[in-house]
């Protein structure tokens, strides 16, 4: 006579609660991992945030502006997607239209291919660029500029003043503001003529007397070195255009450092 088998025991309520908690924890971990992967892909391939550390693009971009750069605008290169740079060939993948006159663009400094710079595109391949007595010439033609209201500034002694401000109109019709802290007598207001080589670009800051750019040590920027195009200011802190002391992390200072009027402004 065979022995009767014991019936299966029903799970206790404690086991059910434990399994439910384990399931919820696993789902939470999966959600976090998926979110991190999506954020990594977006940052690597589509958009990347940058903070402006210097005043070379005043009045367009101020120190303490946080900008979003689109990486797809010019296609991708080994310098714009660093996580997989070792597997990418030279050149750009799926290039877009390429940098255009007037674009605000982030690029890797040609001298080290690692430091991020942000400037305005002023010369395209084949262009001849020169500064004469503070005026910009492209292909022997002076770039029109219109004087507008002086730009608020603090002199070296901390006194409030204004400096000359102009609206320049580039050959393709793009208008942008520039300032001349030293008038038209700055050290970079008179240069030789630069012939932009094929596959390279000439970059300049809008603060014409306070910008290390293609007129100086930056030189011509290869197309491969472009990271992306500046699109929008999504955050900004500072009490003056070139305030380097403010920090977005010190949120308790936002009541007097947050530049609310600059939030979500398109970069032009």
Image (cartoon, helix red, strand yellow):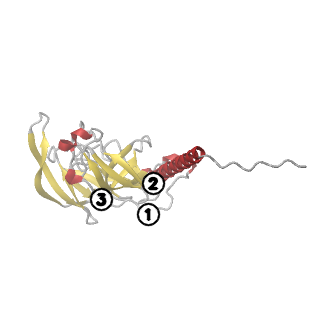
Q: Is residue 193 left or right of residue 110?
A: left
Q: Which residue appears at 88% of the width and 49% of the height? A: 2
Image x and y of residue 47, in percent: 41, 54
Q: Residue lying farthest bottom?
A: 173
Image x and y of residue 254, in percent: 22, 43
Of the two numbered discs 2 and 1 on the same chain, state the one appearing first in sequence.
Answer: 2
Mark 2 or 1: the one toward you: 2
Q: Secondary structure at mark 1?
A: loop
Q: Which residue appears at 24% of the width and 47% of the height? A: 62
Q: Eyeballing the image, is 266 above or below 190?
A: below
Position of the C terminus, as image quadrant, is bottom left
Q: Nearer the viewer, residue 71 or 20?
A: 20
Q: Secondary structure at mark 3?
A: loop
Q: Which residue was labeled with disc 3?
A: 102
Q: Nearer the viewer, residue 117 or 201?
A: 117
Of the two numbered discs 3 and 2 on the same chain, state the one appearing first in sequence.
Answer: 2
Residues at marks 3 and 2, CA–CA distance in whole angstroms: 26 Å
Q: Secondary structure at mark 2?
A: helix
Q: Which residue appears at 24% of the width and 38% of the height? A: 244
Q: Nearer the viewer, residue 55 or 84?
A: 84
Residue 9 in sight in this render:
yes
Q: Is residue 37 left or right of residue 117?
A: right
Of the two numbered discs 1 and 3 on the same chain, state the one appearing first in sequence.
Answer: 1
Q: Eyeballing the image, is 168 above or below 30?
A: below
Q: Is residue 157 left or right of residue 266?
A: left
Image x and y of residue 172, in percent: 28, 66
Residues at marks 2 and 1, CA–CA distance in whole angstroms: 18 Å
Q: Which residue was labeled with disc 1?
A: 96
Image x and y of residue 104, in percent: 32, 55
- Do the residues under discs 3 and 2 have CB atoms within 8 angstroms? no
Q: Which residue was labeled with disc 2?
A: 42
- Do the residues under discs 1 and 3 have CB atoms within 8 angstroms? no
């Amino acid at each position: 006579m065979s022995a009767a088998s014991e019936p299966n025991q029903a799970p206790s309520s404690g086991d059910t609660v434990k399994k439910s908690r384990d399931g919820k924890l696993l789902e939470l971990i999966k959600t976090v991992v998926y979110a991190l992967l999506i954020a990594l892909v977006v940052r690597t391939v589509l958009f990347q945030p940058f903070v402006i550390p210097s005043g070379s693009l005043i009045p367009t971009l101020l120190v303490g502006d946080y900008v979003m750069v689109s990486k797809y605008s010019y296609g991708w290169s080994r310098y714009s997607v660093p996580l997989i740079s070792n597997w990418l060939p030279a050149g750009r993948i799926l290039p877009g239209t390429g940098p255009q006159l007037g674009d605000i663009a982030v690029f890797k400094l040609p001298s080290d291919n690692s430091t991020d710079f942000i400037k305005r595109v002023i010369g395209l391949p084949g262009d001849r660029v020169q500064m004469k007595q503070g005026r910009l010439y492209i292909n022997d033609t002076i770039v029109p500029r219109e004087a507008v209201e002086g730009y608020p500034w603090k002199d070296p002694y901390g006194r409030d003043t204004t400096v000359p401000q102009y609206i320049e109109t580039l050959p393709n019709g793009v208008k942008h503001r520039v300032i001349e802290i030293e008038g038209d007598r700055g050290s970079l207001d008179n240069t030789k003529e630069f012939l932009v080589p094929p596959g390279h670009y000439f970059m300049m800051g809008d603060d014409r007397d306070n910008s290390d750019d293609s007129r100086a040590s930056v030189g011509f920027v290869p197309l491969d070195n472009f990271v992306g195009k500046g699109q929008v200011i999504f955050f900004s802190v500072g009490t003056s255009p070139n305030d380097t002391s403010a920090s977005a992390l010190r949120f308790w200072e936002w009541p007097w450092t947050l530049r609310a009027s600059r939030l979500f402004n398109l970069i032009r």
